[in-house]
Image (cartoon, helix red, strand yellow):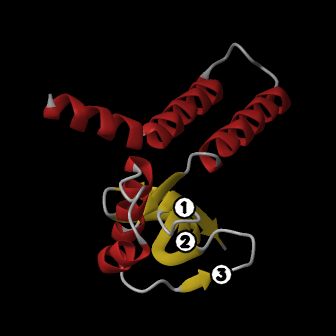
Amino acid sequence: MAIIFILEMIFIISIPYIIGGILVGIIIWLIRTRLIKSKILKTLIIITILLFGCIILSNFKDERPDDLCAEMNEINHNQSLIGLSKEEVIQLLGEPEYESHRKNMNDLYQYDAGSLDRGLFWGTTTIFFDSSYGCKFNVAFDENDKVKSTSIQYVD
């Protein structure tokens, strides 16, 4: 089962290279073929193929959270903090980076949750880096100072 998963991941990661190889093959075939006699038409077809290839490859991106962001995403997904008191949250996550105490509103704690990198990655190597977003983990409390909800926020 693990081997199939690894092969699938290698295939998914290799998609830009597969597309690029197919495009190169089509271009070489177009240059060598005698079916299309006009050099201008061949040139236009090649330019069109390259343009579409660049559009496809430039849109192939991936997101990679760092360890802290992945951990906070897991906590948010599992909703494992729901029902805990403020003291229990502080004991688990530490002191919040930001606290909001507004009248007629529930309290909110905000924690730094690492970062999320966007780009094209091959294993642990970054092939193309696009941008990085900061992750913030929000913990909202109800009127009884128990965790009502959690959320992840991505900021530039």
Residue placed most toward the observer, 66 or 40 = 66
What residue is shown with label 3? 101
Task: Give left or right: position of 96 versus 74.
Answer: right
Label 1 to label 2: alpha-carbon separation: 6 Å
SS of the residue at dot 1? Answer: strand
Label 2 to label 3: alpha-carbon separation: 18 Å
Label 1 to label 3: alpha-carbon separation: 19 Å
- Type of residue at label 1? Ile
Name the spot of residue 149 as percent of width and height, x first.
53, 56
What residue is shown with label 2? 136
Q: Residue at x 31, y 56 (%)?
A: 123
Question: For the residue carrying disc 3, how many other residues have a C-alpha within 10 Å: few (<14), some (14-19), or many (20+)?
Answer: few
Residue placed most toward the observer, 124 or 97 = 97
Name the spot of residue 35 as percent of width and height, x first.
70, 13
Comes first in the chain, label 1 or label 3: 3
- Type of residue at label 2? Lys
Which numbered mark, 1 or 3, is in the foreground of this view? 3
Locate residue 54: give its quadrant.
top right
Residue placed most toward the observer, 65 or 5 = 65
Name the spot of residue 30 as percent of width and height, x first.
64, 25
What residue is shown with label 1? 152
SS of the residue at dot 3? Answer: loop
Q: Which residue of the protein is positioned furthest toward the front in this rendering? A: 144
Task: Give left or right: position of 136 versus 3.
Answer: right
